[in-house]
Image: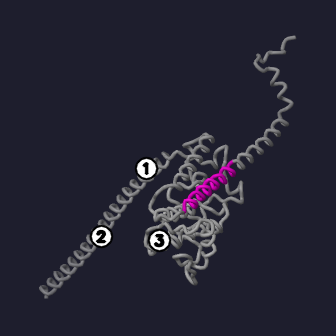
Amino acid sequence: MHSRVSNHETSNKQIGCKGELRQIQKIKKKKKIELREQQLKKKEFESLIAENGNLEELIECLIAGYRQVPATDLQKQEISVDLSDSHPHFDVKDGEQGMSSDVEGNAEELDGIELDDLLDDLVPNEVTNPENSLIILQNTIAEFLLKIDEDVASNVDFSDFMICFNGERKTIGRYSFPISLVPTVERIMNAYGDVSASSPMNMNITGKIYLLFCATIKEMEDLELHQVTQTKMLKWRDAIKDALRVNFKVEFAMSHLKKIARAYCGGIGEQVLLTINDKLNSLYKERAKALEGFKDFLANAKDFDGQSVSTGLFP
């Protein structure tokens, strides 16, 4: 009997030990999991710190590079050139999207510097003299005018024109033209003859070039100066240059495009002058108010002009 009780107690002790052992193992396992999670979080935190450091360095580099651009925010200078407000009939903003043309002129990006970028997105601390701002604008205009005459890879296609190239066609000379271009082609023929006649190239090659050239002239006929954009003019340049490369007699078109480009820049200059005039008018009004407010004291100030303030103190 005593032996049985002893065995039973021993068995209970063994069961209790096993339970405690399992409990200890569970606690150890839980601690290992928590330690692993802490290590992962620590690594993630260190990674985020490193990434943040890299981003800070990148931002500093970008800011440093951006500040090296010789530019100024004309909006914050004494001569503010808000062209769209000063002249509502002439929109300097490029009016297109992507590669598609828009007769009304919506926003489009241009390779290189846009003239309106100088007005809206320049570093205010680099140039503090308004005269320098105008020099920058004039230099950028000069750079754009040089682009008009550049020989670069052509980047013009049918999708750049708001003209229907499909549907019914009419043959004029050696080429077939969509009805939308026929009046323009006929005006070119009447004024300059067959501009393609001197080209030795195969018609399969020159056909598209001829269509794009005529589409260019068509857009010149349809648009007014305030609807013309820099990107539009560079597309026209590409189409005309392509025609010149295959020996089309279209020098007249290039000459006219340069005239349009100069007129476009003249429109910008007109707006700059209008803005300056508005500033001057405002300053004249401000001066008149200041004169009215201080006129009673100005005479007293002149009494001491170049003299000691004791002047008049002694009879």
3 and 1 marks in contact (CB < 8 Å): no
* In magenta segment, residue 285: no
- Residue under the point 77% across and 45% down: 281
Q: In the displayed structure, would residue 296 be above or below residue 315?
A: below
Q: Secondary structure at mark 1?
A: helix
Q: Which residue is mark 2?
A: 33
- Residue under the point 39% across and 53% down: 53
Q: Which residue is mark 1?
A: 61
Q: Name the main secondary structure of what is drawn in magenta.
A: helix
Q: Evaluate whether residue 102 shows in this view.
A: no
- Residue under the point 79% across and 15% down: 310
- Front one among 81 and 38: 81
Q: Secondary structure at mark 2?
A: helix
Q: CA distance from mark 3 to mark 1?
A: 48 Å
* In magenta segment, residue 257: yes
Q: Is residue 81 left or right of residue 158?
A: right
Residue type of the residue flagged with mark 1: Cys
- Front one among 258 and 79: 258
Q: Position of residue 50 (x, y in %)?
A: 36, 56
Which region is colored magenta?
250-272
2 and 3 marks in contact (CB < 8 Å): no
Tell me if mark 3 has few (under 14), some (14-19) or many (20+) residues whose alpha carbon lies within 10 angstroms of its own.
many
Q: Position of residue 47 (x, y in %)?
A: 35, 60
- Residue under the point 79% across and 20% down: 304
Q: Which residue is mark 3?
A: 206
